Amino acid sequence: MKKSVLVTGATNGTGYAIARRFAREGYDVFLTSRNGEKARAAAQRLAAECGVFAAGYALPVGEEALVCDVFADIRARGYLLSALVLNAANLGIHQDALTVPLEEFQAVIDTNMVWNFSIARQAALQMRQAGGGSIVFITSNTAYRAIPDRVAYGASKSGILGMMRALALDWGKYGIHVNSVLPGMIKTERWRQNQGDIQHVPSAYTPLGDVAEFDDIAGAAYFLAGPDNRNITGAELTVDGGNMVQLYPILPET
């Protein structure tokens, strides 16, 4: 059966880079976004760029029936999913723990944990039938290193690691690998434009002297979900230039 991958939040940035890496390795690609028009446009762009089949779906958070519909369509097209990369996230920015409305806190948990679980479960059902597969959660080094006013985000990223380990244990008997990639700072468009001097915040000063490109995260996801991963499950791969190994960043003298 043809190799296939589903990537969530894949219309641009890290998600699109992940989808493109798999496409370049010969995978047909399914991708999702909250915006169906953007998802379909990204799929068309990917198909033209890499010469593979690609399809895009609208997948709003909290709609389990729509998750089931997406996987039913994948099956109807003749696929049993080979790999799943869960990249989409609610960033939960500016959430003061003393004042954040409970529904806003809950929305981050619902997106980053409950919704991801729903998608992972539907993928696992197909992978079990296929005799195996790989699931990769894109989490964050903030699972271990707190940042200000991001209480729900940090909690959800830590929670994903616990969920990942539990699913690796439960689904290993079906030949399903479940792992996580933990990015640090990434060279987003905001980083490149240096808005608010983001290139010079302490977390930008890594032991390697650089922060991640989108393709660095894509390469890590492909390593864990691709055919060379025979015996790794329940593992975390950190891609942050070494930030997590240092007690504090060494800032250049001015």
Image (spheres, grey):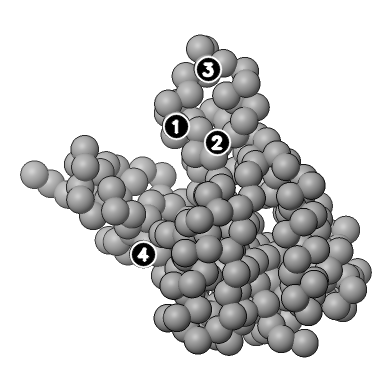
* Quadrant of the snapshot with the C terminus: top left
Dot 2 or dot 3: first in sequence order is 3
Measuring from the top left, give residue 153's x and y in whole percent.
Answer: 55, 36
Can you name the residue that lies furthest to the top here? 99
Measuring from the top left, give residue 110's x and y in whole percent.
Answer: 68, 36
The numbered disc on residue 100 is 3
Evaluate if marks 2 and 1 touch, with contact meaning CB atoms under 8 Å apart: yes
Residue at 47 percent of width and 64 percent of height? 41
Question: In the picture shown, does residue 106 fall above or below 183?
Answer: above
- Alpha carbon distance from label 4 to label 3: 32 Å
Q: Is residue 157 left or right of residue 178?
A: left
Question: In the picture shown, does residue 251 fall above or below 221?
Answer: above
What amino acid type is highlighted by mark number 1?
Answer: Ile
The numbered disc on residue 38 is none
- Alpha carbon distance from label 2 to label 4: 22 Å
Dot 1 or dot 3: first in sequence order is 1
Residue at 47 percent of width and 65 percent of height? 42
Residue nearest the viewer, comparing 52 with 223: 52
Dot 2 or dot 4: first in sequence order is 2
Q: Residue at label 1?
A: 93
Dot 1 or dot 4: first in sequence order is 1
